Amino acid sequence: MINEVTGEIEDVKNASSCEFYVTHGEKEKLRGKGIYFLRMTAPGKGINPSGTNDNEVLFGEISNHIVPVLNTIVNQVYKPLVEKLEDGEWKMCEIDQKKEFLQTFDKFAKELTEAQESFKTSIKLESYDEDQKKNLKEMQNKKLNADLIPSLCRTHNKWQETIDNLLTEINTAKIDKEAGPVTEIEHWKNNMRKLTSISEQLRTENCRTVCDALEFIRNNFPD
């Protein structure tokens, strides 16, 4: 089941039946491997349940560390293999098509590397007090610990301060007027990495727990 306050997926002990739920994944993150299905038929058209659906439904396995895994596969497996292909191995592929494919593939590989680098930053949103975890779970039973709200608010305010400082830094940073386009591109890429890191952290269980708990308190404990 999903804890209404923390958003965590919790095991149901002594349950007589299993629970099935559908989620878009904003709050409930993968714990391990998952499976995805993608219907390829036109909108409104169903699939044929009596036969194989290889052309109608795409499916596969997805990891909870999708960016690092995909980056490793593309840059350390596929890219070296493609680069080692001899001219004769391209068969009927025309020179212009080969060139276009290699350029597109190389661009995609670089974007994956940059995406992984965006997670590496010194800007961290601190975790909430683990001692409050028990109090968070008890809120579902309408039990509110007096120390919980100040603790969550302090954590939330520190996040706000960190984000405000980052935005101020980005807005006030200046690029040397004599710097070339490469320097300016790297400057904005660096800013993008910082913002992406903050955005991803705000989607983690840590941040979602605090935000959801404060919203739950506001809606259920108006006084």
Image (spheres, rainbow, N blue to C red):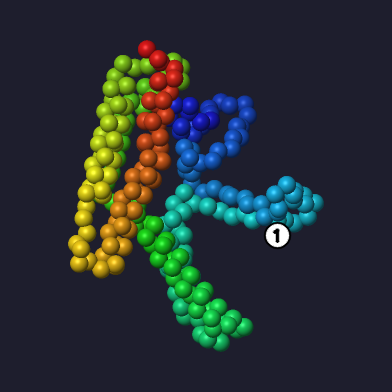
Residue 62 image position (x, y, % from top left): 53, 52
The answer to whether any part of residue 198 appears in the image is yes
Q: In this rendering, is residue 152 above or below 125?
A: above
Q: Residue at x 60, y 84 (%)?
A: 91
The answer to whether any part of residue 131 appears in the image is no
Residue 59 relative to residue 27: left or right? right
Residue occupied by mark 1: 55
Residue 127 relative to residue 41: left or right? left
Residue 181 image position (x, y, % from top left): 29, 67
Residue 152 relative to residue 102: left or right? left
Q: Tag 1's secondary structure?
A: loop
Q: Residue at x 41, y 41 (%)?
A: 203
- Judged from this view, the residue extending furthest toward the top is 223
Residue 12 relative to residue 49: left or right? left
Q: Count the numbered circles shown.
A: 1
Q: Quadrant of the C terminus?
A: top left
Q: Amino acid at mark 1?
A: Asn
- Judged from this view, the residue extending furthest toward the bottom is 88
Answer few, some or many: residues within 10 Å of disc 1's Cα (few below 14, many 20 plus, some between 14 and 19).
few
Q: In this rendering, is residue 2 above or below 144?
A: below
- Between 96 and 136, the residue placed more toward the observer is 96
Q: Residue at x 66, y 52 (%)?
A: 39
Q: In this rendering, is residue 80 above or below 194?
A: below
Q: In this rendering, is residue 207 above or below 48?
A: above
* Quadrant assignment, res 199: top left
Residue 205 image position (x, y, % from top left): 40, 37
Residue 77 image position (x, y, % from top left): 46, 69
- Between 222 and 8, the residue placed more toward the observer is 222
- Between 137 and 83, the residue placed more toward the observer is 83
Q: Residue at x 28, y 22 (%)?
A: 150
